[in-house]
Amino acid sequence: MKQSQNSMSVVAAIYGRHSVRSYTPEQLDRDTINVLLAAAVRAPTAIHKEPWAFVVVQGAGLLRRISDCAKAFLSQEIHHAGLHTGSHALDTLASSDASVFYSASTLIVICADTTGAFFTADCWLAAENLMLAAHARGLGTCVIGCAVSALNSAELKAELGLPAGTTAIAPIIVGVPADETSPTARKEPRILAWK
């Protein structure tokens, strides 16, 4: 699974990266994950705070519990927002087989010490670095935003060992894509002003 760090240009990684929602059961090794984390911490950081910390989850049982908890939180949020009428999302969530992690074998959660002013932005910059580095190595990634509430629940924070003052910001699944997919189209940049 190891490849040269120069295996793809930055521009090729940016234009080729896309969300992957189908994975093989292949487990990522510790060295590969460490390479991705090393890329993540090279992100820009306000006032050089480097607020990020990481939780790596590879245990199938824990991934299932987090997924089930995320589905429960998401279901509550959909009902609370009044979006439940005719919602296909609720049917999907109700399926006991459905996983919010698309059967990926690895979840990397970028967390932050929340005492600084720019910790959220710093963590999302780290997330993009991680995803681009993964793509450059032939791996797939997908941000699983619906897992944030569950990951910040008292129960899961305790199980994951997140200290007080730390919050989960960016849950990202990483793995070997099960099939070939292409990047989706994007709209042209919307320029509000150019003075």
Image (spheres, rainbow, N blue to C red):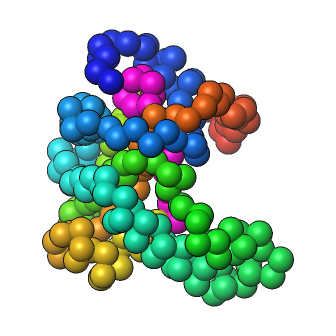
| Horizontal side of residue 42 vs 144, given as left or right | left
Q: Quadrant of the C terminus?
A: top right
- Image quadrant assignment for residue 154: bottom left
Pick whichever, 159 or 74, lies toward us: 159
Residue 112 higher or lower than 122, as above or below: below
- Image quadrant assignment for residue 40: top left
Q: Please indicate, yes or no, whether residue 114 appears anywhere in the rendered image.
A: yes
Number of disc labels: 0
| Horizontal side of residue 13 vs 22, given as left or right | left
Q: Quadrant of the N terminus?
A: top left
Q: Report x, y in % for residue 80.
A: 63, 87
Q: Which residue is depicted at the point 37% across and 52% down?
A: 107
Q: Report x, y in % for residue 163.
A: 16, 71
Q: Report x, y in % for residue 38.
A: 22, 34
- The magenta stretch spans which residues? 133-146
Pick whichever, 64 or 6, lies toward us: 64
Looking at this view, name the residue that lies furthest to the right: 86
Q: Which residue is depicted at the point 54% across and 52% down?
A: 102
**Residue 136 falls inside the magenta stretch:** yes
Q: Which residue is depicted at the point 49% across and 18% down?
A: 11
| Horizontal side of residue 88 vs 72, given as left or right | right
**Residue 189 falls inside the magenta stretch:** no
Q: Please indicate, yes or no, whether residue 110 appears anywhere in the rendered image.
A: no
Q: Which residue is depicted at the point 58% across and 84% down?
A: 76
Pick whichever, 183 or 25, lies toward us: 25
| Horizontal side of residue 153 vs 176, given as left or right | left
